[in-house]
Amino acid sequence: MTRAPSGASTAHEVTAVGTDLVERYLEHVRVEKRLAQRTVELYALDLQKLSQQAAQAGVELLQVQNSHIRRWVAQMNAGGRSGRGIALILSGWRGFYVWLGREGLISSNPVQDVRAPKAGKPLPKALSVDQAVQLASFASGSNDPWLEARDAAMVELLYGAGLRVGELTGLDTVASSSARGWIDLQGGEAHVLGKGGKRRSVPVGAKAVLAITHWLALRDQALAQAKPGLQGPGGNAQAALFMGRNGTRLSAQSIWQRLRQRSLQAGLTTPVHPHMLRHSFASHLLQSSSDLRAVQELLGHASITTTQVYTRLDFQHLAKAYDAAHPRAKIKGATPK
């Protein structure tokens, strides 16, 4: 009988011990912490990677040091893994070593002070002016003029006033003590309740006023013909500016779905969501006016730092315009002969 070399035997024992610890931990999070099956599966993948790294370094999981973790993070970063992806892996590893500490198997957590590399904050996605106008001007030719008018009004208001989707769903047709927000067509304003319970007034453009006026005519006509069950308390019509066929206030999820569908019907290659129209509103205002403070107030940002991200979008727009039109742009970066 041939015996395995002592080194191979030791490596096998290390792997077996590590596998047993991982299985015990996964059973702990599955049974005692009652985590979802998908979460447990993700933890298992993270710990499989940890076991592989430890095996390659020739250390047991119980012997992993802070220096090992930092080296593996650097390797993942150099390999192109995103900062967010590394952070998720570290979270899984950290939880495992916290459990080992509670079990009395280690004296310190090697992952405790390790952080993932900071990921660059992605720029908000905005439509070009032509794309935004293409979407706002789109008419689907639908056989349902009620839905067509409602969806067109929503697009005009999201792009024309830069509202958050939660602010849009909270709009009523008239002001009241219970209203989260309301539309004032005569004054050309939307009064909304934003983040942190802050109220603000936003101007509503002529195109949006026309679209909302058209929608309200069809909305009120439908409510007048509706069954009593679709009326509001006391027989009054529902107050919500945007509602579904059942007479209830339109949800944010429904607006996301309708806008996505409408943008694709309009021929845009990228499905549009409500916040993309808010980003477009801000970006296009800055391109025209460069008034950062005004845009901050219109968006309802507490800090101008939040608004400044749109200056980066504005610079991208200017850079593209330069590259496309300036006679000297075409030789940028050219190698001298």
Image (cartoon, rainbow, N blue to C red):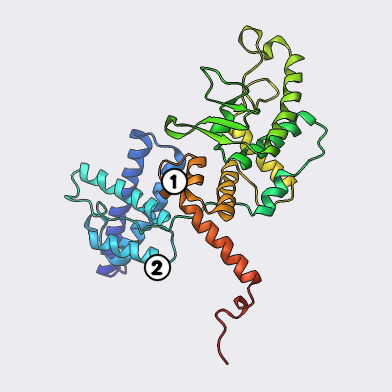
Q: Relative to the observer, which residue lies in front, 62 or 179?
A: 179
Tell me, yes or no, if residue 151 can be seen here: no
Q: Are marks 1 and 2 in contact (CB under 8 Å)?
A: no
Image x and y of residue 71, in percent: 30, 65
Q: Quick one: label 2, few (<14), some, or many (20+) residues within 10 Å?
A: few
Image x and y of residue 262, in percent: 71, 42
Q: Which residue is mark 2?
A: 78
Question: Upstream in the sequence, badge 1 or badge 2?
Answer: 1
Is 266 placed above or below 9 here? Answer: above
Q: Quadrant of the N terminus?
A: bottom left
Count how many numbered circles sit on residues in the image: 2
Residue at (24, 46) in percent of width and height: 100
In the displayed orientation, state which residue is furthest to the top. 234
- Say what amino acid the circle numbered 1 marks: Glu
Q: Relative to the observer, which residue lies in front, 82 or 329?
A: 329
Image x and y of residue 13, in percent: 27, 58
Q: Which residue is mark 1?
A: 41
Is 80 placed above or below 167 here? Answer: below
- Say what amino acid the circle numbered 2 marks: Ala
Q: Quadrant of the C terminus?
A: bottom right
